[in-house]
Amino acid sequence: MTRIPGTRFLHSPGPTHIPDEVLHAMHRQPMDHGDPRLDQVIAAIDEGVMRLLQTRDSDLFMFSSNGHGAWEATIENLVAPGQTVLIPGTGHFSESWAVQAEALGRRVIRTSFREGYPIDANDLEQALRADARREIVAVFAVHTDTASSATADLGALRAAIDAAGHPALFVVDVVASLAAAPFAMDAMGVNVAVGASQKGLMSPPGLGFIAVDRRAGKIPARNPALRYYWDWGRRKADLSYRKFCGTPPQNLLFGIEAALSLLFLEGIGAIIARHALLARAVHPAVECWSREGAVMFHCRVPAARSVSVTTIETRAGIDPEAIRTVARERFQVAIAGGVGPQTGRDGMERAIATLAEDQ
Ligand SMILES: *Cc1c(COP(=O)(O)O)cnc(C)c1O
């Protein structure tokens, strides 16, 4: 492949473009385990992530893992083997989380999923009402599904759980939405928030984190599931070596500390406004490109379109891989390919390219 000069623009929903300040912050020697400066870095990240999530009264757990690791930790701590979770269908990511829970011996109830549509809060309410024996211990909802690029209305989902009078915990995956779409854990009545480092946090992949409120924090002690590395209780400690169940990923933490500084320098409100502004540029552009019918929005509901990722379908017969190749090789723009059922290579009639607006 020819080497093309100039700056590459990584327009992928994750990993995302990493600012130079973050890259430079990682370029240093690690510290010894006992160095109090390491504890300061970890404390700064703990505080910064809680601030981003807008939660005061939660515990934050961090893992040397990607988002799938954080998913696994959530399943292992909150749900005993044989217990049930309700996972509203958002597409690839809700389904992957469901498959993972089932692989770990948990029962999953799914609400039906319509391609191109966000979670239907009524479906959620009905599924909870139907659970007369109160077997569902938690609702696992994906805020923005990166494959479908639809963002769920978390207020409506919380209201549906309340309307059903169901005690299930409200667990939200904010991997693709944090620091892009509005989110406020405490105000939205979210019990557990699950995130990762490589999307809105502008850092390399490799850190998964989970904020757990008081109510959810009591569950693991009563949950007999065997667990060690993922166990939240074991990680409630001041020692960095215990917090990470072994050596903390220091250089990654240096980067995330710098990324959080950048985010707070800009301000949460300004970050949310910037993403909304970029979405107001990208969405009309896609609408304009759609007029001839060669491409179209995958998400059929304008109000549910994500501000951080836009999934575009191509008409049958148009290969999205060719578009991506031209974008990458001629214009230095890396556009992500479709994932899951939206993969361009799986013989589906419609294929999808993903365009991220982040940064
Ligand atoms: C990217 C993503 C994940 C998975 O993260 P990995 O770090 O790739 O394991 C989970 N949920 C959502 C919504 C995502 O976009």
Image (cartoon, rainbow, N blue to C red):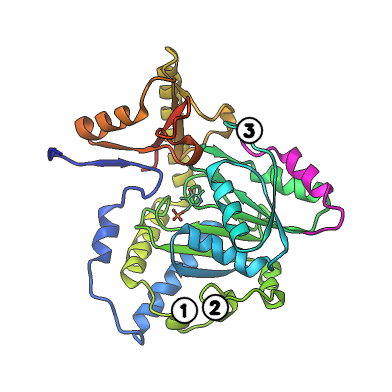
Picture residue at 61% right of the left edge, 68% below the top: 76
Identify the element where label 2 is drawn.
Answer: loop
What residue is pinned by disc 3? 114
Whichever of labels 2 and 3 marks the residue nearer the N terminus, that label is 3
Q: Are marks 1 and 2 in contact (CB under 8 Å)?
A: yes
Which corner quadrant holds the C terminus?
A: top left
Neighbours of disc 2 within 10 Å: few (<14), some (14-19), many (20+): few
Asked whether, in this view, residue 71 is left or right of residue 333, the answer is right
Report the residue that reaches farthest toward the top: 292
What residue is pinned by disc 1? 245
Neighbours of disc 1 within 10 Å: few (<14), some (14-19), many (20+): many
Spatial distance from mark 1 to mark 2, Cα to Cα?
9 Å
Amino acid at circle 2? Tyr
Spatial distance from mark 2 to mark 3, Cα to Cα?
38 Å
Which corner quadrant holds the N terminus?
A: top left
Residue 196: x and y, percent?
A: 46, 58
Nearest-to-viewer mark from 1 and 2: 2
Spatial distance from mark 3 to mark 1, Cα to Cα?
40 Å
Asked whether, in this view, residue 290 is left or right of residue 152, the answer is left
Above-or-below relation of 268 to 31: above
Neighbours of disc 3 within 10 Å: few (<14), some (14-19), many (20+): few
Residue 132 belongs to magenta span = yes
Residue 298: x and y, percent?
A: 51, 29
> On residue 228, which mark appears?
2
Amino acid at circle 3? Arg
Residue 54's quadrant in the figure? Answer: bottom right
Image: magenta residue range: 118-135
Above-or-below relation of 20 to 155: below
Identify the element where label 3 is drawn.
Answer: loop
